[in-house]
Image (spheres, rainbow, N blue to C red):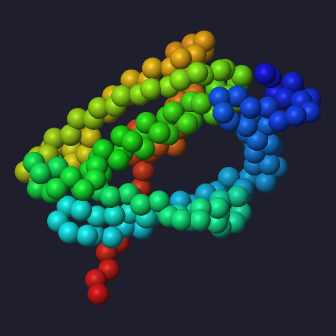
Amino acid sequence: MSKSNLAQAETPVTMNGVSVTGIFDTIAAVKKQPDLAEFRFRATNRWISGGHNRSSIQGFYGCGMEDTSREKPFFFDASEPPVLLANNEGANPVEFILHALAGCLTTTMVYHAAARGIAIEGVESSLEGDLDLRGFLGISEEVRKGYREIRVNMRVKSKGSPAVLRSLAQFSPVFDVVSRALPVIVTVETH
């Protein structure tokens, strides 16, 4: 459905489980008032023991106000497997990056496809990332501490072309974060 047909639609239009009407209403609102596009997401984290820690995510700032739609926080336990000296209390942090990337690529593709009238019946992804512990362990300064490469294979049931769907997925904010360098400011306070 084109934007002009959408504008003429009397009832809200949904595609891929997404309100296309809502997408275009959001775009129009942000064009009119650009500060609505500014969001600030937050997480808090508490160390439990050894390699085990827990993050909590609930509120965020967006659309010019504090969002209070989440009645309860989401909790995410992070840990390491025994080979990395912990007890598997949760996925490890670099695995959470794969999860975040898969989730964001999928959501982004589905939303952008809906806005362009491309139906999607299903999306499945598999991700792999290569990491050399010598960087993390401080054994070699030449070895990167994080992933040196992440491979994503998305299998999409759609009549949309693979090239178009790939380009739509790459509007993903997490794709942008992991594929480009950005400043991360770390401060430490002791008490």
Q: Nearer the viewer, residue 175 or 113?
A: 113
Pinpoint residue 107: horizontal percent, then vertical percent. Answer: 55, 36
**On screen, residue 94 above or below 58:** above
Describe residue 157's horizontal placement relative to residue 51 as left or right.
right
In the foreground, 57 or 169: 57
Which is nearer the eye, 2 or 18? 18
Q: Is residue 90 above or below residue 61?
A: above
Residue 31 lies, in percent from the top left, at 78, 46
Identify the image quadrant of the C terminus: bottom left
Q: Is residue 77 left or right of residue 86?
A: right
Total number of numbered discs in the rendering: 0
Instruction: Give the answer, above or below, for where 130 lies relative to 85.
Output: above
Dividing the picture into quadrants, the one containing residue 160 is top right
Residue at horizontal 70%, vertical 58%?
63
Regarding residue 61, the answer to whether it shows in the image is: no
Nearer the observer, 154 or 171: 154
